Image (cartoon, helix red, strand yellow):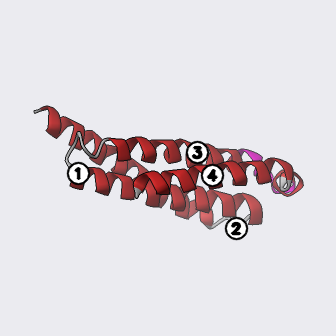
């Protein structure tokens, strides 16, 4: 399932990134949010690949921990990148306060993955 989720996030990351570069360029420039959109796109794509990689670790690490880590990375990607996309496109400034929640979810996912690796090596 997580390979599918990662693949869909990767596919949408490429599509949204291309749309931002070509279809939203004037809007992003007018809002002064081109860098914000690029950050959202970068994190979106990085974590799509990370989720696929985490899925491959299910047989090597505690499967329950890996499942939770993948879920946290997915939720974090959706909240973090989603909030930044909305901020960049619609200039809704309150979304800047939502993005850190996604960042905390991403940190928790990476932390849980680190714990799973540490626990497997003990």
Quadrant in the rendering for residue 91 = bottom right
Disc number at residue 92? 2
For label 2, the SS is loop
For label 4, the SS is helix
Q: Are marks 1 and 4 in contact (CB under 8 Å)?
A: no
Which label sits in the foreground, 3 or 2? Answer: 3
- The residue that disc 3 covers is 45
Q: Nearer the viewer, residue 75 or 104?
A: 75
Closer to the chain start, of discs 3 and 4, is: 4
The total of numbered circles placed on residues is 4
Q: Where residue 51 appears, x then y in whole percent?
A: 43, 47
Magenta stretch holds residue 33: yes
Which label sits in the foreground, 4 or 2? Answer: 4
Quadrant in the rendering for residue 42 = top right
**Distance Cα–Cα, label 3 vs label 1:** 24 Å
- The residue that disc 1 covers is 63
Closer to the chain start, of discs 4 and 2, is: 4
Closer to the chain start, of discs 3 and 1, is: 3
**Residue furthest top as drawn:** 121
**Distance Cα–Cα, label 3 vs label 4:** 9 Å
Q: Are marks 3 and 4 in contact (CB under 8 Å)?
A: no
Which label sits in the foreground, 3 or 1? Answer: 1
Q: Where residue 11 appears, x then y in whole percent?
A: 62, 52
Q: Residues within 10 Å of mark 3 (few under 14, many from 20)?
A: many
Q: Are marks 3 and 1 in contact (CB under 8 Å)?
A: no
């Amino acid at each position: 399932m997580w390979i599918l989720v990662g693949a869909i996030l990767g596919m949408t990351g490429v599509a949204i990134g291309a749309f931002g570069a070509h279809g939203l360029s004037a809007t992003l420039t007018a809002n002064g949010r081109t860098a914000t959109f690029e950050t959202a796109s970068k994190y979106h794509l990085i974590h799509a690949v990370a989720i696929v990689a985490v899925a491959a670790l299910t047989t090597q690490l505690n499967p329950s921990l890996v499942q939770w880590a993948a879920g946290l990375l997915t939720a974090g990607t959706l909240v973090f990148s989603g909030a930044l996309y909305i901020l960049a496109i619609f200039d809704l400034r309150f979304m800047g306060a939502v993005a850190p929640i996604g960042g905390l979810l991403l940190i928790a996912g990476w932390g849980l993955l680190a714990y799973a690796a540490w626990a497997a090596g003990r």
